[in-house]
Amino acid sequence: MSQPEASSPGRRGLGGARIVLGVTGGIAAYKAAELASTLVQAGVALTVVMTAGARQFIQPLTFEGLTHRRVYTGVFEGWNDGHTGHVELASGADLLLIAPATANTIARLAHGNVDDMLSAIALATAAPIVIAPAMEQHMWLHPATVANVETLRERGVTFAGPDAGRLASGAMGQGRLAATGEIVAAARAALGRGGPLAGRTVVVTAGGTQEPIDPVRFIGNRSSGRMGIALAEAAIDAGAAVRLIVTRNVDPQLVSGDVVVVESARELREAVDDALPAADVLAMAAAVADFRPERVSDQKIKKQGGQESLDLRLVRNPDIIAGVEKAGLLKVGFAAETEHVVAHAAAKLEAKGLDLIVANEAVATIGSERSQATLIARDRAPVSLPEAPKHVVAARIVDEIVRLLTLEDADA
Ligand SMILES: Cc1cc2nc3c(=O)[nH]c(=O)nc-3n(C[C@H](O)[C@H](O)[C@H](O)COP(=O)(O)O)c2cc1C
C-alpha cells in the first residue's frame, strides 16, 4: 500500500492533509473507525498506526479497508524497499492525531518512551499533535494522568475532550472519547496553526432565527446554516480562533468547536455583543428575521370555533450588523436576494457600513449544498465566483477577508 504523498505547499484544511491517526487499546477504539472514515471522506491522506493494545479491540483490516493504506504497529515495521518506517511516517505527517488515547499511551508519550510505532512517530515528528483521551474517570483524574497531560500540554500538544457522560463501565463521569466532530475540529485547528488568520478572532453567525409566536410556534426561514458553518471551518483552516453563533435549527452534526446556540434575532444580537470585544472579523451569514411578533403568547394559541383568520402584528427586529461599532472590526455581510442581486447587495454594503458583502441568489442558495456568490468590497469591482459547493465558496470568502485585513494593516 502507498505511503503518504507530499502535501502541497499552501494547502489549507483537511483536503490533501497527511494525517497519522494513532489508535490505542481502549474500549473506544471502535469509534476510531468512524473518525477514520470521516477524515478520508474529507480528503485526508490517512495512515493508521495501532498499538498492540488497540489490536485487541479492533482489526487492522477495518482501517486498511477504510484508508486503502497499510496499517502499522511495531517500530521495526516499514523498513523495507527503501522505506524508513517511523522516520518517514513522522517526517511526512502534517498532523499526528491519537484517538482514542489510553492513560498508558499518554504516560508513554509524557515520558518519551519509544516501544512501538506510535510512540516512535510521536517522538520523531515535528508535526502538531492532537490527543483525544478515553478512559474511566478515576484514570483520567489520577494525579499521574493529570501530571502527564500537563507535561504534554506544556510541550504544545492539544487535547480534544474527554467529554463527560456514560462510560464503558456504566458509571457516569468524565472520560468519554470526544465526539467525532469535536476531534475533527481540533485537527483542523492544529493544521491551520500559523495560517494567514493566525492570531485573529473571527465571529461567524449561521442558520436562521426563529421568532416565537407562542410556546410551540415561531416564524422562521429556510436557512440551513451550511454557509456559516463552511465559513467558520474555512476561517479555522486559515488559523483563526472562531466563535460560531448558530440558531437552534442548525443540524448539530454539522457544528463543532466554540459554539453558542441562539433562537431569536434578539438572542443573536446578545451573543454577537458578548463576542465582539475579542473579535477582529464579524461575518453575519445567519438569516436574521427583519420582523418578530409584537406579542408572544404565554400559552399555545387555540383556534376558536368559527374563527377564519388570525392577525399577527409584527415589529422590527434590530439590524445587528448595522448597529455594530468597533474600531478596526472587519464587517462581512451576506445578501440573499431574489432580483437585482448585485445592485441590492452593493446598496446594503453602503447602508450598513460593511467592508465586504457576499451576494447570492436567494432561492438557489438558501438550504442548498452549493452557492454562486459575488464578492463586493469597496476598493474594487465585484468579483463573481463560479458556482461551487459552499466550502469552496467559503474558502474564497476567507481569502478575501485575508486580503482586506492585509490592506487594513498596511494602512494602519
Ligand atoms: C476491556 C478493556 C478496556 C480498556 N479500556 C481502556 C480505556 O478505555 N482507556 C484506557 O486508558 N485503558 C483501557 N484499558 C487498559 C489498556 O488496554 C492498557 O493500559 C493497555 O496497556 C493500553 O496499551 P496502549 O496504550 O499501548 O494501547 C482497557 C483494558 C481492557 C482489558
Image: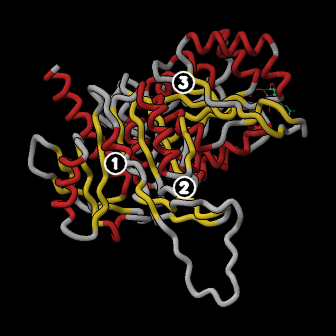
Give the quarter of the figure containing the C terminus: top left
Q: Residue at x 78, y 11 (%)?
A: 144
How far separated are the C-alphas under marks 1 and 3?
A: 26 Å
Circle nearer the N terminus (1, 3): 3
- Residue 142 picture location, percent across and down: 82, 15
Residue position for label 1? 394
Q: Quadrant of the rendered structure where residue 367 is? A: bottom left
Which amino acid does the dot numbered 2 rest on? Val
63 or 148: which is nearer to us? Answer: 148
Residue position for label 3? 129
Asked if the residue under mark 2 is in contact with the one under mark 3, i.e. CB atoms within 8 Å, the reply is: no
Name the side, left or right, on which 139 lies relative to 366: right
Q: Is residue 60 above or below residue 327?
A: below
Direction bottom: furthest residue: 306
Which amino acid does the dot numbered 1 rest on? Ala
Q: Please give the label number shown on residue 21.
A: none
